[in-house]
Image: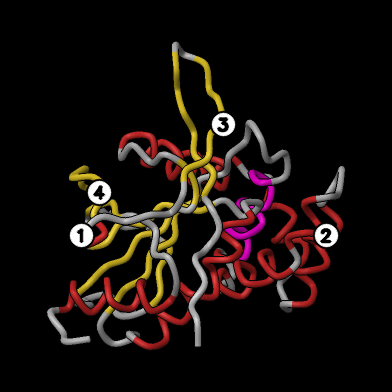
Amino acid sequence: MKTQTLPWIIMLAIVGGAIGIVTLAVTGNKGGELSPVAIQLGPDEIWKGKEDARVTLVEYADFQCPACSTYAPLVGKIAEEFKDEVRVVFRHFPLRQIHSNADEASRAAHAAFLQGRFWEMHDRLFQEQRAWSASKDPTGLFDAYARDLGLNEEQFKNDISSDATRAKIEADVQSGFQARVPGTPTFFLQGRMMQNPKNYEDFRLRIQTALGQDS
């Protein structure tokens, strides 16, 4: 069966203080490493897998980003296949300049996290991306997703607009700037930025290499 190369990712280019939008093809060099910039983990990370896993994969993502939606099932498969060996960490990186609903989507996901349902909301937001992305006011849709997930609606509505939730999203964004995240999605494997995998087998090979396994 032929494999397909995943779509291009949206990149941010900062030139002369102005933020512009460019696109780059997802092509990797040997080992898939893009940059030696290291990334550190904090105590309030959103993650799944084993806390003491041998390998950590960090993703910076924007819920309104089409490429992030394409990669989401692949990251899910990695988390499942290597659940005892890889910890998958999610960090918010809404591209507010081009995605008007991305920030609120991140806040909806964090509000779900506070009730223990982050990954369920994460999946729902990507599955329904076209619907809420096209909405001038996606609040009602996010509320509906919360109801479907059995969340406490009053708490959800309070948390989605709380200062603490906004601060968490902004902290993730600032950490992305510090790590020189160029766009979404961006992955860090073992603390080092890597070229985005072309397909699942490529992704799987990167993980196996980090684990020191044979393909």
User: In the rendering, at what x and y percent does residue 68 appear?
Assistant: 56, 58
Q: How many marks?
A: 4
Boundaries of the magenta span: 102-112
Give the answer, above or below, for where 95 lies relative to 73: above
Relative horizontal placement of residue 60, taking residue 73 as reference (left or right) = left
Answer few, some or many: residues within 10 Å of disc 1's Cα (few below 14, many 20 plus, some between 14 and 19). Answer: few
Q: CA distance from mark 3 to mark 4?
A: 24 Å
Earlier in the chain: of badge 1 and badge 3, it is 3
1 and 2 marks in contact (CB < 8 Å): no
Where does the C terminus fall, quadrant-wise? Answer: bottom left
In this figure, which residue is indicated by the disc labeled 4?
39
Please report the residue visible at 42 percent of the width from the left and 65 percent of the height from the top: 198
In this figure, which residue is indicated by the disc labeled 1?
30
Please report the residue visible at 52 percent of the width from the left and 49 percent of the height from the top: 9
80 magenta-colored: no
In this figure, which residue is indicated by the disc labeled 2?
131
